[in-house]
Amino acid sequence: MVQISKPVQGILWMLLTTLNFVMVNVLVKYVGSGLPVLESAFLRFLLGLVFLIPALKSVAKVQFTPRLFKLTLARAVFHAIAMTCWFFAMTKISMGEVTAMNFMNPIYVSIGAVVLFGERIALPRILALVVALLGGLVILRPGFREIDPGHLAMIVSAIAFAGSYLIASQLTRELPASVVVFLMSVTVPFVIAPFALLQWETPTLHELVLLFFTAAFATFGHYSMTRAFACAPQSVVQPVVFIQLIWSVSLGMLLFGEAFDPFVVLGGAMIISAVSFITWREARAKRSGRGAAAVVEKP
């Protein structure tokens, strides 16, 4: 049997991750045309609870403090906003634009860490942030075309995902990662539920099946991403995330008749290059005990 090196295993796991998450995009894009956005987001989490059963033993051992409760609730609010805006954006703009703009959330995480936690930031990292922000402008092209509400929703979504990740980074200092994921997945439906019920439409069996598979692909995507990071440093596997943009643009054209936009690909390449550079620098800083690597938050 051929032995595959750990870095290659990490790249293969990350490649599988991109396939899982692009399938989430495809299913959300398809279901989003039939159900209200808030209901779709609510059902995606509700139907995905079955995948959290293995984490129950770990959750049962946790002693919850008022601080942990507040952080968990705050993360649920951020994540609910992020998911709702993301679902809305999928109904308004192309899959390629959604994917490329979602690459921005590590950039907002970096900015948030500086603003909220006083994290020091060196000139090379500042330049990488500028490149990423310019990449976002290349995608949006304000002044050269009309900005769709879906674009604004994705900006809010990426910022809210960044807020969710910053809180998660605090929680993972005190709780196992599986418990942090469990708490987020259980609390988000409670935040969304009251708003979803206001515009509730009875879903068909077909829509429920598709949303169940949406939750399944998202769960498997998080699992494969975890395996990728376990096999190789983020600086090695992070650039592979760009493949997700290629999947999204290609499937958007084939399945939904979306036009190919070279500016989206160029802007996405600029963002993921900047994120990969920041990840590489943070990984090096972590090895020397000065920091932690950034992670792209996924739906």
Image (cartoon, rainbow, N blue to C red):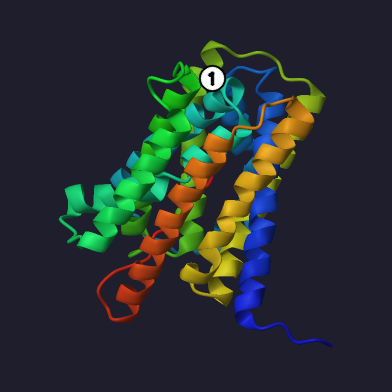
Q: In the rendered view, does 69 fall on the left or right side of 114?
A: right
Q: Which residue is painted at 35% across and 58% down in the image?
A: 169
- Which residue carries the number 1 mark? 196
For label 1, the crowd category at 10 Å Cα-Cα, with few meaning under 14, some 14 to 19 and many 20 or more, is some
- Above or below residue 173? Residue 250 is above
Res. 43 image quadrant: top right
Residue 128 appears anywhere in the view: yes
- Residue 147 location, quadrant: top left
Q: Nearer the viewer, residue 70 or 216?
A: 216
Looking at the rendered image, the quarter that the C terminus falls into is top right
* Residue 142 spot, x, y in % from top left: 39, 23
Q: Of the residues shown, which amino acid type is indicated by label 1?
A: Ala
Q: Secondary structure at mark 1?
A: helix
147 over 234 or under it: above or below: above
Percent across and percent down for residue 174 are 34, 64
Residue 249, percent from left and from top? 66, 38
Q: Is residue 278 above or below residue 248?
A: below
Task: Judge whether 124 appears above or below 270 on screen.
Answer: below
Residue 295 seen by the camera:
no
The residue that appears at 47% across and 46% down in the rendered structure is: 103
